[in-house]
Amino acid sequence: MTKRYFMVLIISIFLIFDWGCQSKDEKGMTRSEKQAGVVQAIPELPPAVIGAINRFFAEAEIDIVETEKINGITLYDIEFKENRGEIEVAEDGTVIDITTVITWQELPSAVAETIKKVLDETGAIAVRLEKAEVQAEVKEESGKKVIVRITPPIFLYEAELSRDNQRGEITVNQEGKIVEGPKWENNGN
């Protein structure tokens, strides 16, 4: 027991000394972290979530972090500044989905046709187009919520819409079938 306590003490002193010797900038990042494009540690994000962010969005700056608990599973929805996209990650680092902002030219033709049809029918305009790569989902198995990986991933396309004093969204699958929406709400609500 004494040896274990002594080892923990030595390791703690080393880590504190090492941490104190690294010069950090105004964002709290070391020069090597900036060079590697590493997202700085945010207190509410577990290390596995930070690892997932660094794999897919290392150069992006975090704008908004939202958490959701589903029967003991914590999900982190992280949005990045400058329309860089977003990622939803489980606490254990499992990526649920990755969303990137795209252009009309990047939409599959069936998806573009469906969205244009909705725009014509509703008198709306598309203010943003996104592509979501769904890699996992939370499902119920044997009365318990679990994360199930999806192989190969599913691709969904979302259009954020605007008309009059309303905003809305529509989600379309790769084949051009409407999966969700259009859903409308008043701007400011």
Image (cartoon, helix red, strand yellow):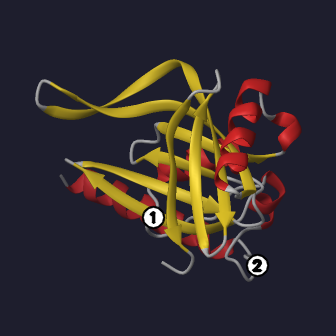
Give the residue at mark 1: 66
The amino acid on which the numbered mark 2 sits, given as a three-letter code, is Asp
Identity of the residue drawn at 72% across and 76% down: 24
Q: Depth check: 182 or 20 in front?
A: 182
Disc 1: CA contacts within 10 A as few (<14), some (14-19) or many (>=20): few
Identity of the residue drawn at 68% across and 34% down: 114
Image coords of residue 132 (percent x, y) = 62, 39
Q: Secondary structure at mark 2?
A: loop
Q: Depth check: 185 or 156 in front?
A: 185
Proximity of marks 2 and 1: CB atoms separated by less than 8 Å: no
Disc 2: CA contacts within 10 A as few (<14), some (14-19) or many (>=20): few
Which of pointers 2 and 1 lies earlier in the amino acid sequence?
2
Image coords of residue 146 (percent x, y) = 27, 32
Q: Depth check: 56 or 97 in front?
A: 97
Give the residue at mark 2: 25
The amino acid on which the numbered mark 1 sits, given as a three-letter code, is Glu
